[in-house]
Structures are given as C-alpha cells and as structure tokens.
Amino acid sequence: MSHWMFHCDEVSQKVSQSMDAVLPFNQRMAVWMHLLMCRYCYRFRQQLMMLRRMSRAVGNGSTCAQTEDMLSHAAKERMKKKLDASS
C-alpha cells in the first residue's frame, strides 16, 4: 500500500481476509475509513457477514426457516422475483 487509503478492490480483499485473521491495526483503520465513505464496500462487508452467519447457522443444524429470518423483507421479495422470472 503506497498511500493511507485503500481502493475498493483492496478493501474487498482485506474484508475477506479479516474473516479469517485479525488485520494489523493500520490496515483495520484504513479499511474502516474506506467503509465509512464507500457504500458499496460497506454493503459487500454486510453481505459477507450475513453469509457467514447463515453458514454458521446451517452448520449448527438450524433449519432453512430459521436462516430465512436473517433476510430483510425486501431481500426476500427480490429473491422471489428473480426465481419467478427464471421459471
């Protein structure tokens, strides 16, 4: 990193890495600053966190109905529309 701020491609990589290991303090701060300013990277992080929670829930033996509660109503509607369109 030649500058104090990451670009989106670097942030997505760092967010993914942070799921497996603790990033150094300076990288965590640079990622956090980027996430405060970039709604797309912020959404990407939220999506990764949701996938992580859902996969853990499924791994713990919860049912599909329980993991479905983690999705917002709007997300469920978008998924239904896409499934209906593909039929």
Image (cartoon, rainbow, N blue to C red):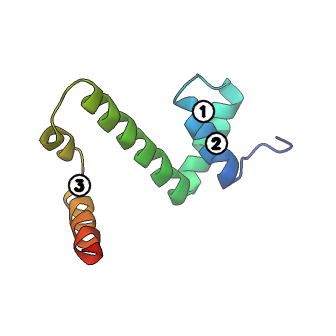
> At which x and y percent is residue 68?
19, 46
Q: CA distance from mark 1 to mark 3?
A: 26 Å
- Kindly identify which residue carries mark 1: 17
- Kindly identify which residue carries mark 2: 13
Which residue is at 66% across, 25% downward? 25
Asked which secondary structure carries label 3, the reply is loop
Which image quadrant for residue 85?
bottom left
**CB of mark 2 within 8 Å of CB of mark 1?**
yes
- Kindly identify which residue carries mark 3: 72
Which residue is at 56% across, 48% downward? 35
Q: CA distance from mark 2 to mark 1?
A: 6 Å
Which image quadrant for residue 58?
top left
**Mark 1 crowdedness (10 Å alpha carbons): few <14, some 14-19, many ≥20:** few
Asked which secondary structure carries label 2, the reply is helix
Which residue is at 54% across, 50% downward? 36
**Residue flagged by tag 2: what amino acid is it?**
Gln
